[in-house]
Amino acid sequence: MRLGAGRFVAGETLDDAARVLRKLNDDGLSANTTLLGEAVHDRDATAEIVRAYTAVIDRIADDGLRANVALKLTHLGLEIDEELAFDNVRALVEHARDRGQLLRIDMEQSSFVDATLRIYRRLREAGLDNVGTVLQAYLYRTPADLQTLLPLEPNLRLVKGAYLEAAGIAYPHKADVDAAYERLLDTMLAGGGYTAVATHDERLIERAIHLAEQHEVGRDRFELQMLYGVRGQLQLDLARRGFKVLVATPYGPEWYPYLMRRLGERPANLLFFLKNAIRG
Ligand SMILES: Cc1cc2nc3c(=O)[nH]c(=O)nc-3n(C[C@H](O)[C@H](O)[C@H](O)COP(=O)(O)OP(=O)(O)OC[C@H]3O[C@@H](n4cnc5c(N)ncnc54)[C@H](O)[C@@H]3O)c2cc1C
């Protein structure tokens, strides 16, 4: 944390995270939180993670925080067994429902998209409506995935996509990803579900606001999402304009891979990190 990870991560413990979530709420922002970690390969370890997330959900409810959980299915055992991941996430979605919260399933590498969407669909078929997932604009398959999900009136977060994918399955050029994002936004906002517009790209944020107006999507049916530590002033400005802004605020001792992804997105962050590392 001393090295500068604290800019992007809300600390190592649930107490640390609860303090940061409270501060975000006080500033007029909503939040989600994630216990950092991915790719667990041991069944017993996944049970431990379910217990930890149960405690997070309870803490959010007990402290009256405007927050929810977002998690990765590989953290709940998707690489061991899809049924195990399903059982684990189902238990957490049910617990979140009982405590009045949404739970969102993040999207990971392209090899997990089919299983993630299958699990999302099974949860909805089981009558659980307090669950959302994520679509990635860089994947060629995403417009088709969106069409198959729309009849469910899904709660979807739209992102550009964070993983290194082959050109055979994902747009390699940023301009094409941005154009795809815009087209998907249009379909999603017109589609009748709930849309979480997750980007720091101001042009796309304004485009989303415009499209929401055009499709008469009320402010209770879409929100803007950004990462903790990125474009903080923009987050506050949008909240002051009356939009729901949710800040994705992860915590936990396993913060290193997350930090590396954030640094990779923007070389200027690397400079920030190195300056802190030298000072520390
Ligand atoms: C709330 C949230 C949830 C996400 N969930 C997922 C997920 O489930 N699956 C997934 O694959 N990806 C996820 N992502 C990551 C996403 O796919 C992108 O990698 C990330 O958001 C960067 O793209 P961008 O949309 O901000 O646009 P970019 O075009 O990359 O950036 C637009 C502008 O934002 C600023 N910016 C962007 N990133 C940073 C940064 N790290 N530090 C400082 N400034 C920055 C820059 O000034 C840049 O010019 C999520 C992103 C957010 C905000």
Image (cartoon, rainbow, N blue to C red):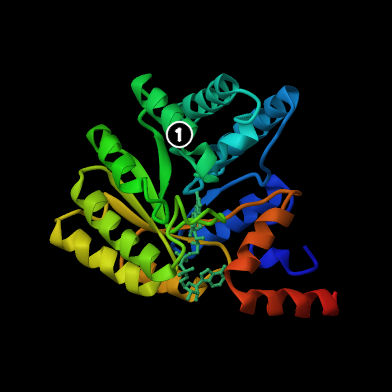
Left or right of 56 in this view: 127: left
Give amino acid for label 1: Asp
The residue lying toward the viewer, choosing from 61 and 175, is 175
Q: Is residue 170 visible?
A: yes
Q: Dot 1 corresponds to which residue?
A: 114
The residue sitting at the front extreme is: 168
Q: How many marks?
A: 1
Write the residue at 45% across / 34% down.
114
Residue 215 position in % (x across, y down): 15, 56
**Position of the C terminus by quadrant:** bottom right
**Position of the N terminus by quadrant:** bottom right
Residue 89 position in % (x across, y down): 53, 28
Residue 20 position in % (x across, y down): 61, 58
Left or right of 37 in this view: 69: left
| Rendering quarter of residue 38 | top right
| Rendering quarter of residue 207 | bottom left
Residue 60, compared with residue 190, is above or below; it is above
Left or right of 279 in this view: 166: left
Write the residue at 79% across / 68% down.
3
Q: Is residue 9 visible?
A: no
Q: Would the CB of label 1 be found within 8 Å of ligand 1?
A: no
Residue 131 position in % (x across, y down): 41, 34
The residue lying toward the viewer, choosing from 67 and 159, is 159
Write the residue at 20% across / 62% down.
211
CA neighbours of label 1 inside 10 A, class few (<14), some (14 to 19), many (20+)? few
* Label 1 SS: helix
Write the residue at 72% across / 30% down.
41
